[in-house]
Image (spheres, helix red, strand yellow):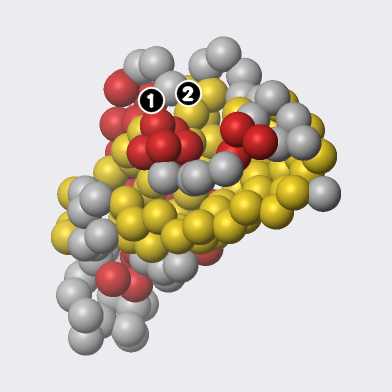
Amino acid sequence: MIWVQGRITLAPRSRGFHLVTREILDGIDGLAQIRVGLLHLLLQHTSASLTLNENASPDVRRDFESWFDDAVPERARYWTHTLEGSDDMPAHIKASLLGPSLVLPLHQGRPALGTWQGIYLCEHRDHGGPRSLVATAFGEG
C-alpha cells in the first residue's frame, strides 16, 4: 500500500467557478506511483468549495455562478452573520451546498475522470485569497 499526502495552495481567484485540475495534479508529488487507488481532496475553507463538472466550455462555469448567486442572494433580509461583508454568509451556504471535498478513483497514477470532467474551485467570496487544499492518495503501486 502506498500513501501520499501533501498540501497545495491554490492561487487567489475572484468569485466564480475556476477549473483547477492541472494546478491540483501538478501539486501532488508521488501520485504517479499509484496504479490503482483513491485520491481524496479536502479544501480547508468554509467560504469556498470543490466540485467536479464540465471542463471544456467556460459558459458552464458562468452559468453555475449565475444560478448560485440567484439561489443564495447577498443582502437578504434574513442574514444575521454580516460582520465580514455581504458576500460572507451566502458564501458559507454555497460552500455547504457543494461541499469541501472530492474522492476520485486513481488509474495509472491519474484520476480516472471522464473526458469532459474537471475539478472546480468554487470561490464564493469576492476576494477569497489563496485557498489551502490537502490531497491524500493511497493505493497499490
Q: Secondary structure at mark 2?
A: strand
- Whether residue 132 is situated above or below residue 33 in the rendered picture: below
Instruction: Give amino acid for label 1.
Output: Val
Q: Residues within 10 Å of mark 1 (few under 14, many from 20)?
A: some
Where does label 1 land, which residue?
A: 60
Q: Secondary structure at mark 1?
A: helix
Proximity of marks 1 and 2: CB atoms separated by less than 8 Å: yes
Question: On the image, which quarter does residue 126 sit in?
Answer: bottom left
- Badge 1 or badge 2: first in the primary sequence: 2
- Whether residue 38 is situated above or below residue 44 in the rendered picture: above
- Image coordinates of residue 79 in percent, x first then y, are 34, 78
Q: Residues within 10 Å of mark 2 (few under 14, many from 20)?
A: some
Q: CA distance from mark 1 to mark 2?
A: 7 Å
Regarding residue 111, the answer to whether it shows in the image is no
- Whether residue 112 is situated above or below residue 31 in the rendered picture: above
| Nearest to viewer (mark 1 / mark 2) | 2
